[in-house]
């Protein structure tokens, strides 16, 4: 039986860990050839090897998403190998290293904006020409519920993810007549290394975990599979009339 993204080629950044790794596996199971990239080469290669061992197609390339020249190399390599690029998932991101306004340094602010927002911009800029030339494509940008509502103590993260939301909408309007769809995904707090490490690093981990959970109407954290389900939908032709949309998968976090 044909998969939901059969024979498409998907480029996924931040594919070595958490949400990126899960959606690489899901998209591969649904028939896409996967190119996953990450700063973390060992873990990224392991995810690609695992997908390949299950009989699917996956290659890994080391990439820092803030490096514009590297983006050109990655896209050129994808086109040389597969001859097409249908799906871009901008998932690489960081959440830690920011801190409250009264404490965050300009350097830490810039690092967060650079990876979460500049990295997304550079990714879209690098893949858009190939997608426009083909007259088709789906770009999926990982924002967050914290790109829609504020969280005290996280100005850089919230600003970077709010930036991704509006970057997505502007680009969606520009590329819609050219056949390319651009949507943002807004996960709630999901059990991934990003969230688990932040809880473990905290002095009051249990309290922090309970506090986070209490903001989700469903009374729990999400799991990576639940975000991957949304990504497959946006990547596939099932969402062919969606662009510039915000897919919130947040257990009710933003419903208040
Ligand atoms: N986990 C959550 O609860 C949650 C919630 C909302 C949004 N998000 C967003 O989803 C995305 C994925 O989050 P996750 O939970 O999978 O995080 P994660 O920490 O598990 O994975 C992020 C990956 O990005 C990679 N990365 C970091 N900086 C990079 C860079 N400069 N270049 C290339 N790769 C880089 C890391 O090596 C890591 O493999 C992020 O953009 C995050 O902000 C996550």
Image (cartoon, grey):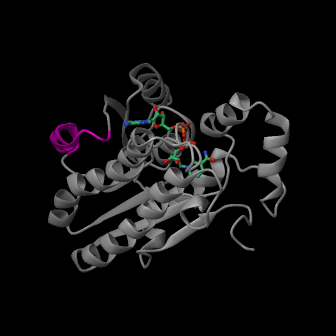
Question: In this image, 196 relative to 76: left or right?
Answer: right
Depth check, front residue: 107 or 255: 107
Task: Kindly indicate the quadrant of the structure image that contains residue 179.
Answer: bottom left
Residue for point 18% across, 45% down:
79
- Of 206 and 103, nearer the camera is 103
**Number of marks in the image?**
0
On screen, residue 211 above or below 176: above
Q: Is residue 8 visible?
A: no
Residue 36: percent from the left, percent from the top?
A: 38, 37
Residue for point 18% across, 57% down: 130
Q: Is residue 256 left or right of residue 171?
A: right
Please identify the quadrant where the C terminus is shown. Answer: bottom right
Relative to 181, is 46 on the left or the right? right
Helix, strand or loop for the magenta stretch, by majority = helix
Considering depth in this image, is 229 or 110 the residue closer to the camera?
110
Residue farthest along the front direction in this orientation = 102
- For residue 112, what is the image quadrant? top left
The residue most toward the top is: 42
Measured from the top left, where is residue 87 in percent x and y?
A: 35, 55
Q: Is residue 77 found inside the magenta-colored segment of the image?
A: yes
Q: What residue sits 43% from the left and 79% below the top?
A: 241
* Residue 165 image offset from top left, x and y in percent: 45, 66
Image vertical order of residue 170 relative to residue 93, above or below: below
The percent position of residue 148, horizontal first and vertical second, equals 57, 67
Read off the magenta span.
65-82
What residue is rendered at 52% in x and 43% in y? 104
């Amino acid at each position: 039986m044909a998969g939901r993204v059969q024979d498409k080629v998907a480029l996924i950044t931040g594919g070595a860990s958490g949400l990126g790794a899960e959606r690489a596996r899901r998209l591969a199971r649904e028939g896409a050839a996967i190119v996953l990239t990450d700063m973390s080469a060992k873990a990224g290669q392991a995810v690609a090897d695992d997908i390949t061992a299950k009989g699917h197609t996956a290659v890994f390339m080391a990439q820092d998403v803030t490096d514009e020249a590297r983006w050109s190399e990655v896209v050129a390599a994808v086109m040389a190998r597969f001859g097409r690029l249908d799906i871009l998932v901008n998932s690489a991101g960081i959440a830690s290293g920011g801190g409250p306004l009264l404490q965050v340094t300009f350097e830490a602010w810039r690092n967060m904006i650079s990876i979460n927002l500049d990295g997304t911009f550079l990714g879209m800029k690098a893949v858009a020409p190939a997608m426009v030339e083909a007259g088709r494509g789906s770009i999926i940008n990982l924002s967050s519920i914290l790109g829609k509502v504020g969280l005290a103590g996280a100005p850089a993260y919230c600003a970077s993810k709010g930036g991704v939301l509006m970057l997505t909408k502007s680009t969606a309007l520009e590329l819609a007549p050219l056949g390319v769809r651009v949507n943002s995904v807004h996960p709630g707090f999901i059990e991934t290394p990003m969230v688990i490490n932040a809880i473990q690093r905290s002095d009051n981990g249990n309290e922090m975990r309970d506090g986070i959970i209490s903001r989700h109407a469903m009374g729990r954290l999400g799991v990576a599979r639940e975000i991957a389900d949304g990504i497959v939908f946006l990547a596939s032709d099932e969402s062919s009339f969606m662009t510039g949309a915000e897919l919130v998968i947040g257990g009710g976090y933003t419903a208040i």
